Image: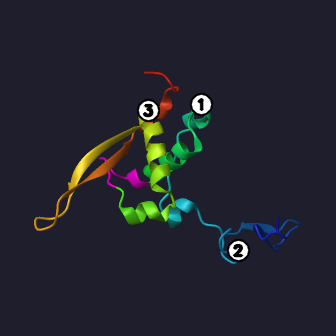
Amino acid sequence: MAANKFIELKPRQGNTPMIQMLSLDMPALPYSRASALARYISVPTEFWSRGWIVELGPTAIALLLILLESQGGYDRPRYVPKERREAYGVSHNTWTQGRKELERHKLLTVGRTPQGGDFDYTRLRNTYWIHKERLFSSPGSP
């Protein structure tokens, strides 16, 4: 593992060296938890144990993860700006396909909200809310 730059062995008194985990992004730096560096998401273990991982297609899983990240820390449905959507590299068709599958499984609610100021053209935008609690039940259950 030390040869692969995953860890660094530092000598210390006694027979065993001190082991320091290294960052995969920048091996010269010590490892830091993702939660300390940037936003992250959590997915309940029931996603696997209840069978969602095999029930949902890869497109729906990708969109689920994207929307969980977007929704993180908020308590109401969120609009996802075009720039944010493009940052994930997901095409419009892929987004729509994943959206339909998540809605079919009652994991996602899509709403509409007006965007624009008093002197701007007001346009309705989609808002998204993932029902994380739904992952605690089995696919196909009411």
Left or right: residue 19 compared with residue 140 = right
Q: First in sequence, mark 2 or 3: give its number.
A: 2
Label 3 vs label 1: CA separation?
16 Å
Q: First in sequence, mark 1 or 2: give its number.
A: 2
Residue 58 in the image: x percent, y percent? 58, 44
Name the kind of residue labelled 2 in the image: Pro
Label 1 vs label 2: CA separation?
36 Å
* Local secondary structure at mark 1: loop
Q: Which residues are magenta?
A: 70-79
Q: Which mark is residue 104?
A: 3
Residue 133 in the image: x percent, y percent? 43, 34
Residue for point 10% across, 65% down: 118
Label 2 vs label 3: CA separation?
43 Å
Q: First in sequence, mark 3 or 1: give its number.
A: 1
Relative vertical location of residue 12 with respect to residue 131 in this rendering, above or below: below
Residue for point 50% across, 61% down: 88
Residue for point 15% across, 65% down: 117
Residue 63 in the image: x percent, y percent? 49, 48
Q: Nearer the viewer, residue 101 or 134?
A: 101
